[in-house]
Amino acid sequence: MAWSSFMTSTIISDSETIDVQSIAEQLQSLVNENSQAWLGAKAYKNSEVLTPALSENNAKRERQYNRYKLLLFQLATTYGKKELHRISQQVSPYDPKQAADEAIYIASLEHLLETMPVLENGGLEVYYADNAEGVFAYSRQNGSARAYIALNFSFNTQEMPLPFGFMASTKVAVWQSDSVSASGNDIERFVTQQAISVQAFSGKVVIVE
C-alpha cells in the first residue's frame, strides 16, 4: 500500500487510538527501501487515496478533522507541497463550515515549506515512537540544516521528543499545527530554556538555526 493511502486509512478512522509504532516502522522502512530516490519518491505520489466517510457524531467529526490536519502536516513534511495539495483535494473528512480554517492551515503549511526547504529536501530518519504517549517523531537533515518533527495523536499534551544530544539554550524556529493564523507566517523563533511540548492532536516542527 502506498504511503499516502496507508496514512489516510490509519489516521482518519473510527479508532480511539493510533498505532504510532506501526506508522514509524512503515515510514522508516519506506525511507530505507528508497534511500537513493527519496527526494523524488514519485512512485508514491500518484496512488489513489480513498476518502473516508464523515462521521455523524460531532465529537468524532471534530477528531476526524484534527487527524486530517495531522495527515496533511505529516505528508507535507515527508513529500512536500505537491502531496499536500493532492491529498487536500482528495480527502475532506470535515464539516464544510471548516473550509476557511482548512485554507488558512494549508497556507501556513505552504509558508513553512517555502521558508524551511530542509523539510522537503532533507534526509529522513524516524527516531521516536511510543504508543502509550501516542507520539512519533522523525528528523530531516540536509548538511547543517536540521529539523525535528513530532505528531501527537493522544488526548493529552506530551513533551516533544528530541534526540540525545539536543542542547539546551539552542536557537530554534518552531511551527505548530494548532497555532496558525490568516497571515500564514506562524514560525516562532526563540532560544530553548525548557522542554518543548506538543498539544493534543497536533504536530510541531523544531528547526535548529
Image (cartoon, grey):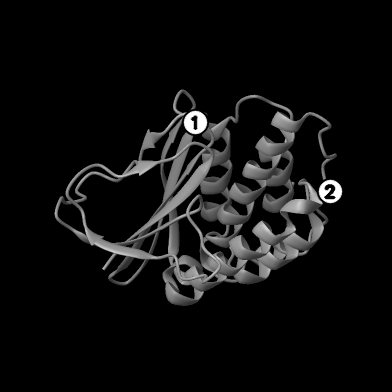
Q: Position of residue 63 (x, y in %)?
A: 66, 36
Q: Tell whether 192 sits left or right of 96.
A: left
Please report the residue visible at 67 percent of the width from the left and 51 percent of the height from the top.
3
| Residue neighbourhood size for the residue with mark 1, other residues' Cα within 10 Å, grouped as few (<14), some (14–19), many (≥20) | many
Mark 1 lies on a secondary structure that is: loop
The amino acid on which the numbered mark 2 sits, given as a three-letter code, is: Leu
Q: Are marks 1 and 2 in contact (CB under 8 Å)?
A: no
Q: Position of residue 158 (x, y in %)?
A: 39, 34
Spatial CA distance of label 1 from label 2 is 24 Å
Which residue ends up furthest to the bottom in the rendered image? 114
Mark 2 lies on a secondary structure that is: loop
The amino acid on which the numbered mark 1 sits, given as a three-letter code, is: Gly
Vertical side of 62 occupied by 113: above or below: below
Residue 50: give its label.
2
Please report the residue visible at 63 percent of the width from the left and 55 percent of the height from the top.
72
Q: Position of residue 173 (x, y in %)?
A: 32, 64
- In this view, the residue in front, 34 or 153, is 153
Please report the residue visible at 74 percent of the width from the left and 58 percent of the height from the top.
99
Residue that carries the numbered disc 1 in the rendered image: 134
Q: Tell whether 105 sits left or right of 142.
A: right
Q: Position of residue 183 (x, y in %)?
A: 51, 72
Tell me where residue 116 sits by quadrant.
bottom left
Which residue ends up furthest to the left in the rendered image? 169
Q: Tell whether 57 sits left or right of 173.
A: right
Q: Quadrant of the C terminus?
A: bottom left
Vertical side of 87 occupied by 10: above or below: above
